[in-house]
């Protein structure tokens, strides 16, 4: 049982380049999330999905797009990377939408935009 | 809006010392409260949670009590080990617009030395 996995682990981009981060979960969870983690700011929600084929904006969605074509996968895209998008990106998933539900996190992707 | 405030780190302790990491929150209603831990190079893992006032969450020797009157959820451990060195995140969770909205504090880094 791998839980939540993310690829790649680390990536360096030049300004203006594009890339896609992949998140996969094998727990059959309905809900998936993308966060970014910046020093001194905790984690902030970029986009989320409440089920296959759905996506919605979170707290800091600008400059990112997402897709959830399959229930187990949640992709985060950067169309034109900017230095401000240098961060550590975490994917998470949960089964239910209840206030007490635990989210399960992947190991993260470290992105450096030059 | 909802927010979480944690004590700033880093916190440096000797092995077997007592640990307290302060966490206070601002929220309407009764959100669930969580502590997540991030070990070096890994994603976040749930450490403990509490879903209503006066609940005590506990795991791996760590404890935290949901105090509605002081809007606090302080993390404590009686005797820390070197293996507890990590970043600790306090978070509140509420159901918002059909998904779990997790709001994180900035994180507190703990370093335990022998």
Image: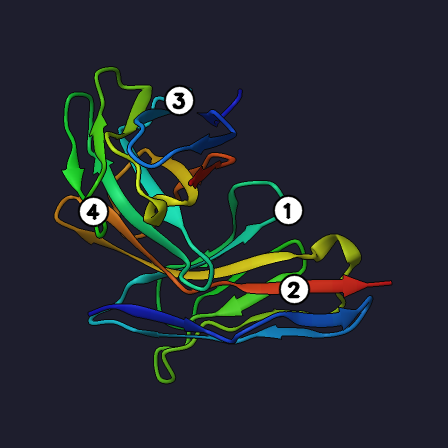
Residue B40 bears which disc, if any? 1
Tag 2 residue? B110
Per the model, the C-alpha gap separating discs 4 and 2 is: 29 Å
Q: Residue at x 29, y 63 (%)?
A: B31
- Same chain check for tags 4 and 2: no
Nearest the viewer among A22 and B58 is A22
Are the residues under badges 4 and 1 in a single subunit?
Answer: no
Q: Name the residue under label 4.
A: A58
**Left or right of B38, for residue B32:** left
User: Could you tell me how far apart the alpha carbons at marks 1 and 2 are, in whole angstroms?
Assistant: 11 Å
Q: For mark 3, does the 10 Å Cα neighbourhood hold few (<14), some (14 to 19), or many (20 or more) residues? A: many
Please provide percent x and percent y for residue A112: 45, 40
Say which residue label 3 marks. A24
A97 left or right, relative to B16: left
Q: How far apart are marks 3 and 1 (CA)?
A: 22 Å
Label 3 and label 1 in one chain: no
| Camera-nearest residue between B30 and B43 | B43
* Above or below B70: residue B91: above
Q: What distance separates the C-alpha of mark 4 from that of mark 1?
A: 27 Å
Are the residues at dot 3 and dot 1 in contact (C-beta closer than 8 Å)? no
Residues flagged by tags 2 and 3 on a common chain: no
| Residue A87 % position (x, y) | 42, 46
Residue A14 vs residue B22: left or right? Answer: left
Q: Which of marks 1 and 2 is nearer the N terminus?
A: 1
Residue A53, how many percent across, how many down?
A: 15, 21
Q: Tell me which chain the residue with mark 3 is part of.
A: A
Disc 4 to disc 3, C-alpha distance: 19 Å
Q: Which residue sits at x=62%, y=62%?
A: B62
Mark sitting earlier along the chain (4/3): 3
Please state the chain letter of the residue tagged with numbered disc 4 in the rendered image. A
Crowding at dot 1, Cα within 10 Å, few <14 / some 14-19 / many 20+, comes out as: few
């Amino acid at each position: 049982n791998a839980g939540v996995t993310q690829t790649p682990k680390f990536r360096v981009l030049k300004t203006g380049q594009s890339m896609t981060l992949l998140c996969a979960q094998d727990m059959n969870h309905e809900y998936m999330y993308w966060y970014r983690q910046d020093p001194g700011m905790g984690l902030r929600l970029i986009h989320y999905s409440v089920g296959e084929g759905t996506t919605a904006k979170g707290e800091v969605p600008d400059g990112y797009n997402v897709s959830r074509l399959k229930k187990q996968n949640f992709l985060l895209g950067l169309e034109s990377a900017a230095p401000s998008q240098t961060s550590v990106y975490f994917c998470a998933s949960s089964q239910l939408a209840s206030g007490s539900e635990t989210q399960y996190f992947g190991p993260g992707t470290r992105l450096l935009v030059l | 809006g909802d927010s979480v405030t944690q004590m700033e780190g880093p916190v440096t302790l000797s092995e077997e010392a007592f640990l307290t990491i302060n966490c206070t929150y601002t929220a309407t209603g009764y959100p669930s409260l969580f502590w997540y831990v991030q070990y070096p190079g890994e994603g976040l893992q749930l450490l403990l949670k509490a879903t209503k006032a006066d609940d005590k969450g506990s795991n791996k020797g760590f404890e935290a009590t949901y105090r509605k009157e002081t809007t606090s959820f302080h993390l404590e451990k009686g005797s820390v080990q070197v293996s507890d060195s990590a970043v600790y995140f306090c978070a509140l969770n509420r159901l918002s617009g059909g998904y779990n909205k997790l709001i994180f504090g900035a994180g507190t880094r703990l370093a335990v030395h022998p």
